Amino acid sequence: RIRAWPELSPALADYVQLSRSTNAILFSIVFLVAIIGVMNTMLMAVFERTREFGVVMALGLRPVYLVGLIVIEALLLAGVSLALGGAVGIPLLWYLQTYGLDLRSVMGELSMAGVVVDPIWYGQHDFPSYIQAALGLTGVAVVSALYPALRAARFRPVEAMRRV
């Protein structure tokens, strides 16, 4: 009789499910931090440039174009962040794929649910996850820039130019 590995080792199957759930929670926290960070950055950029936005609106810039300008700025911020993250992450991943992270001094021989875990952990490419994370963070940047952009679009030019 042929059985799938989750039937043969239910404890290991439970551990894999726990690992997936933990990853989902960690990704949620990372995306929440990204939302707060981008929104804070864009909100401060809008507050610092209130006078300039008032001037360009007085010169005839429509609120829709002002929203577009701020969203494009958020896209550029996301693009630069992804490029810098890739510049740091790609060499680090290459190192982990080549040499691995030696945890022998920390954990020795480790066995989990009857499976011996190698004390040297190696990195692995997962391009679909990279694309998904990059698109998700870009979407987060755009969505979190909408509130500051809509707030700037509601400025009245005369009042905005008076602010210091």
Image (cartoon, rainbow, N blue to C red):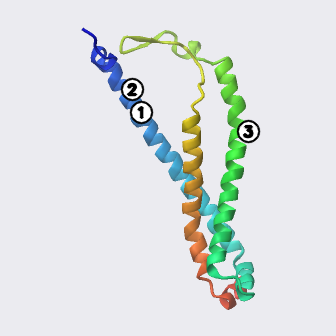
The span from disc 2 to disc 3 (Cα, nearest Å) is 31 Å
- Residue at 69% x, 52% y is 79
Q: Quadrant of the C terminus?
A: bottom right
Residue position for label 2: 16
Closer-to-camera residue (138/152)? 138
The span from disc 1 to disc 3 (Cα, nearest Å) is 27 Å
Q: Eyeballing the image, is 133 above or below 146?
A: above
Residue 11 drawn at (x, y percent): 31, 19
- The circle drawn on residue 20 is 1
The residue sitting at the bottom extreme is 158
- Residue at 75% x, 84% y is 55
Disc 3 marks a residue whose amino acid type is: Ala
Disc 2 marks a residue whose amino acid type is: Val
Q: Do residues under tags 1 and 2 come within 8 Å of each other at their CB atoms?
A: yes
Residue position for label 3: 87
Give the mark nearest the N terminus, 1 or 3. Answer: 1
| Tag count | 3
Q: What element carries label 3?
A: helix
